[in-house]
Amino acid sequence: MASKEHKLQVGSFIFSKGETLDVGGGNYFRTHHYNAIHRVIRIDGDLVKVVPLVLWSFEDKPIATEDDFETYTKAYELLKKNITTMTITAVDADDLYREEGTDSASHTQGLLKKYPQLRKSYYWYAALSPSKANIPVPRDRENLQLYLMGVYSAKGIIKNRKLARYNDILPDDNIPEYFENSGDDIDLIINGK
């Protein structure tokens, strides 16, 4: 899709579908199908940093897990139709980590106080903190390898309609490579609010 609302940009939601194969003892094989939703949080040339959209309530148990495929699929389809009108909370990634000595319940209450919209919606994602949003892509090997976790190729997304992940293990020349012909199939790209 090439229309404005489906063009890849920061803030886009990428809906994808994939499968994994479980191999057990003997002749046991089982294919697991899954759906995933990612939010684009940064684009640097061909490097597209995404984070998963989480379907979770901070107050209750999760509403859907990958093991609960039917419920998760219903939520996935609902989001495809309504994502631009739903409340989806950007939670600063730094806020997700508890301070040492803080119990889980206190931490959750702190998040609900800082992000009251979490009480209204089950959907959130870990956003880059403002201090990290505009730092340049690292050039040194160690920090570049860390940066490449959760980074996909814009070319793979746009041209091949695949979430083609960059390899976070760099070759000797330190030039990142991506897995061109592998990755989840992209179902839809929608630009959110």
Image: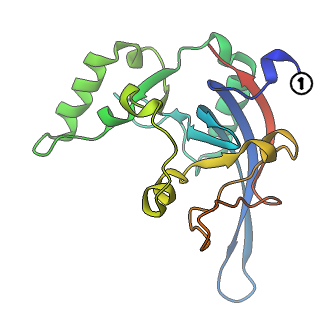
Which of the colour schemes (rainbow, by chain, secondary structure, one colour) is used? rainbow
Disc 1 is placed on an element classified as: loop
In the rendered image, which quarter is residue 41 located in?
A: top right
Tally the numbered discs. 1
Local crowd size for mark 1, using a 10 Å CA cut-off: few (<14), some (14–19), many (≥20): few
- From the top left corner, tell me how far across and down residue 128 is, in percent: 44, 32
> Would you say 170 lies left or right of 95 here?
right
- Residue wearing tag 1: 2
The residue at the point 48 percent across, 19 percent down is 121
In this image, 30 relative to 58: left or right?
right
Query: Can you say which quadrant of the picture contains the C terminus?
Result: top right
- Above or below, comparing residue 165 to residue 39 in the picture: below
Picture coordinates of residue 25 (x, y %)? 65, 86
Q: Eyeballing the image, is 178 above or below 115?
A: below
At a point 46% along the width and 31% down the height, the residue shown is 133
Which quadrant: the N terminus? top right
- The picture quadrant where one finds residue 82 is top right
Q: Is residue 120 left or right of residue 156?
A: left
The residue lying at 55 percent from left, 53 percent from top is 148
Q: Quadrant of residue 110?
A: top left
